[in-house]
Amino acid sequence: MESWDDRLSRIPTQWSMVQRAHGGQQTEVGDAQRKLLERYGGAVRRYALAALRNEEAADDVFQEFALRFVRGDFQTASPDKGRFRSFLKTTVYHLIVDHQRKKKRGAREAQMGDDAPEPVAPDEESLGDLFNESWRDDLLARTWVKLQAAEGETGKPYYTVLRCRVEHPEARSPELAELLSERLSKPMKAGAARVVLHRAREAFADLLLDEVAHSLDEADRDRVEQELIDLNLLEYCRPALEKKAGPPTDAT
């Protein structure tokens, strides 16, 4: 049976996808661009919305990012300049700064003419924290979508069960069983509710691990674990990570 590390080694890195999105055959370029925008467009927009607190402004930043990406403005990006998430964060940060400067400059010039002072850019470190939160939220959102799709394909009600738990975090097993009996239109006992909830959490953790692995420049056990730590996601995935990948590499 194929090990998890073997499967991780075959995941295309995000830098290789960036390179395909800016070179090669037109069909390949278009496909790579579409996949990257689908995968990271949500994080970009979440970041812009968290920073700007305005739907229209966030849409403007995302559209500018997509335009520059499709136009080929990022073709000089490479892993030599840092990991992909850092590249994306810096790129969108500058787009946010440009948007705010244009807006403030326009407002000030309308009131004060050409003597308007240059607006102060927002702090990159604080916006960097927002980006990490947006990245984390997007990983979780995509995991929920995949869990729901898996329920539709397999009939295993893991999405329904886990959503029910999230919506009723204080419910004990008998109450949870009653709620699930209603939602699933079939009777469920407390013991069965505990079992299916445990399996639902395992399924969610497995899907989240895959999402994190796909987001990395290089996916191996140690890098996946460090990314989970950096994004405060390890609590969701520790048992699944140990089950899939075995004990961590001994650095001594």
Image (cartoon, rainbow, N blue to C red):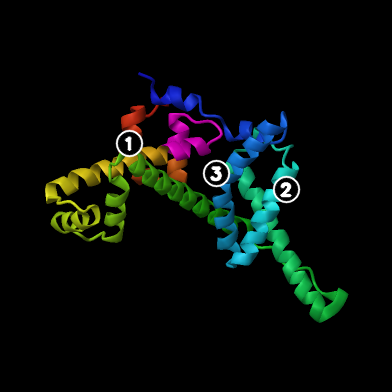
Element assignment for label 3: helix
In the rendered view of the protein, which quadrant contains the N terminus? Answer: top left
Where residue 99 sits: x, y (%)? 71, 62
Residue under label 2: 68
Question: Label 1 amino acid?
Answer: Ala
Which secondary structure lies at badge 1? helix
Task: Considering the whole magenta stretch, tell me its main secondary structure.
Answer: helix
Give the percent coordinates (x, y) of residue 81.
67, 37
Q: Residue at (47%, 35%) from the top-left corner? A: 213
10 Å crowding of disc 1: few (<14), some (14-19), many (20+): many
Q: Name the residue carrying label 3.
A: 39
Q: Which of the 4 image quarters holds residue 174? A: bottom left
Instruction: Quote the CA–CA distance across marks 1 and 3.
Output: 23 Å
Q: Amino acid at mark 2?
A: Arg
- Magenta range is 210-225
List the single residue furthest toward the top: 1
**Sooner in the amino-acid sequence: mark 1 or mark 2:** 2
If you read the primary sequence from the N terminus, does the residue marked by circle 2 or circle 3 appear first?
A: 3
Q: Amino acid at mark 3?
A: Arg
Residue 215 sits above or below residue 161 on the image: above
Q: Secondary structure at mark 2?
A: helix
Where does label 1 land, which residue?
240
